[in-house]
């Protein structure tokens, strides 16, 4: 099966659920009541889900789309039944003979093309419609869809205000029956009784289903006007006699699985879960705050101890510097003492040498004295005196 990627340009069942599914499925469910036994054209059919739904009531249903990939997907997904087929074609150049279609259905198409093409598309719809045929068309209400929300859909080329759409339709489709479509969160109340032309769950009034719209609060309840919808849905014909005789005043659509209700319930559960998580987070935050405050007290005490220790460290450093100065002075004194010791040792060596010299001289003197005290000395003494005298005479 060819796969189509959901880009937001067209609705693809199975890839987008919830609000967008409600809008698209509801339009086709609304149109289905008017196509019983008729030849139907689904213009810009996309992947073909709506064409298949219309074919379940129509005599023949043809889906056309300019996107060949979408048509291939429609063939693969919905097949080619005896009363349904798909073709690749532009809504401004339909491959159909004049007056060959009883009902043209075109949902959320006109805003995707430029102004000139919008005119050609409506002219093509008028051309292929048989006498007594009519058009069912939807278009975003530009005021609600874009202006009030400050939103721009990148796939829309020209959105229309109601007056602009009415003027364009008036050329070939002067008779129109207007409907509004809006997603709504409200309380629905309806009767189980049936009468007249109604389907399941309706109340008839001269062929027209009736409903009441109320607004209020706990104290007052008042009638309220039907609101201006985000989308316009129009049943248009060239003659008023071609318009369907009966139309619902109110049409509600809920998918079989009630996905929107389940989504809303899921959101409530998610809110409750997040609220519980928030409470847990707040409790955790409170505990963390108490812990942080305890840590702040510890930090303050540590800072006090650090300041006190720093003061003590200053005293220790001062004492250490004093000791270092004393040590330096002691080292200097030691150096001086070592120098003095070296000098003393030098002097001592000199004294020792002098003492040795003196000892040698004393020894020599003692030997002389001993010699002079001997008999030989006394014998030699006169001769020594004569010798000294003679040397003096000679030297003179």
Image (cartoon, helix red, strand yellow):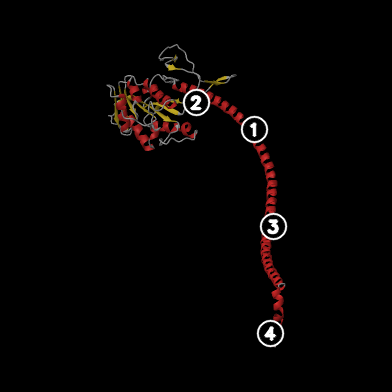
Circles 3, 4 touching at the beta carbon (< 8 Å): no
Disc 2 versus disc 3: distance between alpha carbons? 110 Å
Q: Residue at x 31, y 32 (%)?
A: 69
Q: Is residue 57 left or right of residue 315?
A: left
Quadrant of res 303: top right
Q: Which mark is residue 333?
A: 3
Of mark 3 and mark 4, the one earlier in the sequence is 3
Estimate the x, y position of residue 371 in percent, counting from the top left: 69, 72
Residue 294 is tagged as: 1
Q: Which mark is residue 227?
A: 2
* Marks 4 and 1, how far apart at CA: 120 Å
The reply to whether residue 376 is in sight is yes
Task: Out of 323 and 186, give the one closest to the viewer.
Answer: 323
Query: Mark 3 and mark 1: span between their CA atoms?
Result: 57 Å
Question: Which quadrant of the view contains residue 50?
Answer: top left
What is the x, y in percent for residue 176? 40, 26
Q: Nearer the viewer, mark 3 or mark 4?
A: 4
Residue 99 shows up from this direction: no
Report x, y in % for residue 232.
Answer: 43, 28
Q: Secondary structure at mark 1?
A: helix
Query: Residue 58: which disc?
Result: none
């Amino acid at each position: 099966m060819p796969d189509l990627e959901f880009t937001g340009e067209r609705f693809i069942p199975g890839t987008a659920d919830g609000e967008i599914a409600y809008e698209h499925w509801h339009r086709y469910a609304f149109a289905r009541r008017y196509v019983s036994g008729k030849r139907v054209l689904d213009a810009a059919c996309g992947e073909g889900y709506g064409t298949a739904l219309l074919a379940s009531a129509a005599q023949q249903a043809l889906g056309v789309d300019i996107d060949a990939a979408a048509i291939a997907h429609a063939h693969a997904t919905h097949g080619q039944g005896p009363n349904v087929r798909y073709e690749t074609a532009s809504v401004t150049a339909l491959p159909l003979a004049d007056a060959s279609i009883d009902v043209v259905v075109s949902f959320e198409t006109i805003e995707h093309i430029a102004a000139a093409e919008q005119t050609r598309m409506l002219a093509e719809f008028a051309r292929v419609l048989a006498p007594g045929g009519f058009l069912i068309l939807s278009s975003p209400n530009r005021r609600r869809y874009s202006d009030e929300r400050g939103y721009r859909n990148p796939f829309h080329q020209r959105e229309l205000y109601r007056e602009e759409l009415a003027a364009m339709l008036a050329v070939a489709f002067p008779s129109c029956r207007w409907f509004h479509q809006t997603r709504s969160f409200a309380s629905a109340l309806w009767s189980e009784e049936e009468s007249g032309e109604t389907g399941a769950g309706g109340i008839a009034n001269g062929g027209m289903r009736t409903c009441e719209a109320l607004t209020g609060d706990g104290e007052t309840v008042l009638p309220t006007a039907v609101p201006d919808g985000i989308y316009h849905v129009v049943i248009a014909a060239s003659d008023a006699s071609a318009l369907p005789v009966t139309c619902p005043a109110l049409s509600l659509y809920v998918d079989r699985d009630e996905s929107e209700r389940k989504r809303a319930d899921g959101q409530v559960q998610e809110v409750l879960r997040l609220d519980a998580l928030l409470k847990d987070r707040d409790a955790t935050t409170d505990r963390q705050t108490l812990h942080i405050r305890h840590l702040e007290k510890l930090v303050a005490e540590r800072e006090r101890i650090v300041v006190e220790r720093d003061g003590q460290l200053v005293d220790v450093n001062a004492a250490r510097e004093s000791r270092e100065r004393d040590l330096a002075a002691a080292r200097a004194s030691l150096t001086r003492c070592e120098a003095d010791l070296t000098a003393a040792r030098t002097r001592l060596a000199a004294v020792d040498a002098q003492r040795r010299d003196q000892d040698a001289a004393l020894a020599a003197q003692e030997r002389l004295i001993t010699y002079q005290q001997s008999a030989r000395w006394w014998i030699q003494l006169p001769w020594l005196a004569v010798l000294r005298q003679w040397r003096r005479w000679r030297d003179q």
